[in-house]
Image (cartoon, rainbow, N blue to C red):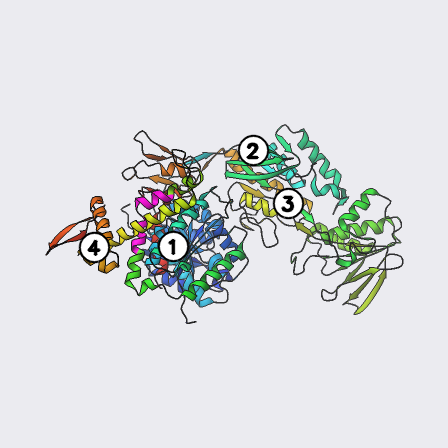
Amino acid sequence: MTDFEPKIIGFLCNWCSYAGADLAGVSRIQYPTNLRIIRVMCSGRVDPALPLGFLAEGADGVMITGCHIGDCHYIDGNLHAKRKYGLLERLVAKAGLEPGRIMLDWVSASEGQRFADIVTGFTDQVRELGPNPAVTDPCVKLNLMAAKAAAAEYRLRALVGKEEKLVTEGNVYGEEMTQEEFDRIMEEVVETEFTRNKIRLILSVKPMSVKGLSAETGIDSRIILDHVVALRQRGWVDLHEVQGNSPVYRAMEVQ
Amino acid sequence: MSEEPRIGVFVCHCGINIGGYVDVPDVVEYATGLPDVVYAEPNLYMCSSDGLQKIQEAIKKYELNRVVVASCTPRTHEPLFQSACEEAGLNKYVFEMANIRDQCSWVHMHEPEKATQKAKSLVRMAVAKARLLVPEEEPEIDIRPTGLVIGGGVSGLTSALSLADQGFKVHLVEKEDRLGGTLLKLDTLFSSNVKASEVINPLIKRVKASTDVTVHLDSRVADVKGFIGSFDVGIETRGEPEMLSVGTIIVATGADYLSPEGLYGYGQVDNVVTQMELEQLFKEGGRLDGVKTLVMIQCAGSRNEERPYCSRVCCTEAIKNAIKLVKENPKRDVYILYRDLQTYGIEFSMMEYDAKKSGVKLVMYDKERLPEVTGGKRGPMVRVYSPLLDEELTIETDMVVLSAPIIPNEDNEALSKHLKVPLNSDRFFMEAHVKLRPLDFATDGIYVCGTAHSPKEVAESVSQARGAASRAGIPMAKGRLKTAAITSVVDEAKCSGCGTCIELCVYNAITKNERGLAQVTSAVCKGCGVCGASCPERAITMRHFTNEELEAQGLAALKEA
């Protein structure tokens, strides 16, 4: 390979993984220098918008590690980490980025060797993938920014927040939902929110017509129109001007 | 906060631990140029009293309002630096650490240039976060005045009694059906040759008589939840579950002895036993009358690739038993075959002299040419090459005694997972810091003593047990403890009252207020941040780990130095 040195950001939970990383040090276990660790109290604290933001800004890989399932310092924070990571995976895929650029795994405080192995493996994997295309390809960057915006919005967050309960206990009416049913709904909402946020980002740079948006995104103009209508209802998009017969839309500043 | 950040960066050499691999002066110079950094300096040991004083002087001299120390891990040293900042009048939450030792110099020892680059990067990230830090107030929690001691051997009994003597209630959990642990199996203890029973029996008696100590025999820890002050520990007694509510936990689970199957004829040749079995023969009395020649072999299963550590007690134990055997019958030939005889310390080093004086024959052997034990006519036959004599000796014996090492308990793994405390590479429990916090785990409220921690003799175990009980007694005596201000806080202007956070919080720290909006009880919040990462309206901020702070850290990481 070339002398490409991937930039990797790691979110490590304070109680297990960060301690495991320290143990790798105490044990003098060597691993590649590419990882930059951000300490968080719990892997469940990793808001998917954060890794997506770093990927948009050119991180070549983002890893998240927490306590092993069942061993979470905060009882079940890592289960929430897993749910959130599910959303992250969907949005990374939606943005057209290689799935190998993100990773979630579990490292206990006593697993220094395992930590080093995971870092080495992930670094090799990202090195193999090469530089993050978002750095050179504005389309990928736009997609990742749209993914980040989608992850920061109410609908996806509300859905992921309820996932554990909906799938394991059922809704307020006591109706249980299978993981498959949930996944189907999730996929739909991810598609919708991703596209709407992308439209909004495009319009924030330059006002466009539905036709123009369709050409820009490669999405059927009828679908774009539906999204534009929804975005207007949310107050995120408004009419800018009418060119000929085509209304041109612009993005609104949202508080 | 309107105050402009004035950041001081302090970069530690940690002797050669960092300085030997990372170009510390270069990192200091780099730090000086980072935004809002008004001062940077190196120190040989930042955690020394001199180092701490330098930080405090700089805070005053340069009017610092944020401090970054680039050194080891916050898991062991953050509290020390935070209190130094507090003494100099800063709030402890305006302090940030860059881990350039455990997560940099130690893991990149062969790549000094890249390690230096990474150290700069880690400092840049810490400074980026420090710029956004704000002072925080700490909530207080109650500490239950009850301790849990896991293990009913000499360490567990000692620490349980010590806690009870301090006025606390104690739950003592022992996996066997009786108290006493390893000392029940020993005949005498070096160096005073006191009977092991004379040490352990009074402890057992006192524990049984104590109204403050509740003993749970045949019991195991099955589940641990909670934090310092309020641990909920699920135990199982002969399959029956029970929940114990305690404030602190002492791990005194002891250790095991290696059964050296296949080593030096053990299990194959008759009359090859371990020191532990020899102790039993002593206890039974008269069993050794016919033994005229006896050979002890040291390091039987330790200080090798599989078990690199020294088991610490075997040399002194062998010498104690050898002297006893020779004194019983001066005509006996007793040999100790050793690699390095280590009867350390004041009282034990004299024993080596005593052994020689009483006629115990000490023969050094070579690690590359280990002694061999085969079946002979009268008993085990030992052949040993002595590098000092440069010849091979053949010894016809009646008995061979193997000094097999103390090994970690098999269930250490499971317990370490329940308690979320680490084991070292030898699978013994590992303290937070070998010198600064030798009896604590990095997790607050959990302490360690005795051979659960490492092989050690009884007096050392007793000292550690008392020490661990004293450590555990500190928060329990205070009764209240300030907890980290790392808690979540709701922005009511953004909260829609959807209740997602309330459902997600396992500590029930979030409730709805009279306006139907989420409200966090800080003292109950443990700071995991799950609520903040999930809040649909992004109305929840995690103190000290805000989105803005984490984002700044990550973006700083992506910026090339």
Q: Chain of mark 3?
A: B
Determine the secondary structure under disc 4.
helix
| Mark 1 to mark 2 CA distance (whole Å) | 41 Å
Callout 2, which amino acid?
Leu
What's drawn in magenta, residue-wise? A145-160
As drawn, the label of residue A203 is 4
Query: How far apart in space, not on screen, are marks 3 and 1 (Cα)?
Result: 38 Å
> How dense is the environment of label 1, judged by Cα within 10 Å: few (below 14), some, or many (20 and up)?
many
Mark carried by residue B450: 3
Image quarter of the C terminus of chain B: bottom left
Q: Residues within 10 Å of mark 2 (few under 14, many from 20)?
A: some
Q: Is residue B103 magenta?
A: no
Question: Helix, strand, or loop for circle 2?
Answer: strand
> Which chain is home to disc 4?
A
Same-subunit check for callouts 1 and 4: no
Q: Please indicate whether residue B64 sits to the left or right of residue A25 in the image.
A: left
N-terminal label among 1 and 2: 1
Q: Which residue is mark 1?
A: B126
Label placed on residue B244: 2
Q: CA distance from mark 1 to mark 4?
A: 36 Å
Q: Are marks 3 and 1 in contact (CB under 8 Å)?
A: no
Q: Tell me residue B425's x, y (percent).
A: 59, 55
Instruction: Determine the residue positioned at 54% across, 50% down.
Output: B433
* Residue A70 position (above or below residue A242): above
Q: What is the quadrant of the N terminus of chain B in the image?
A: top left
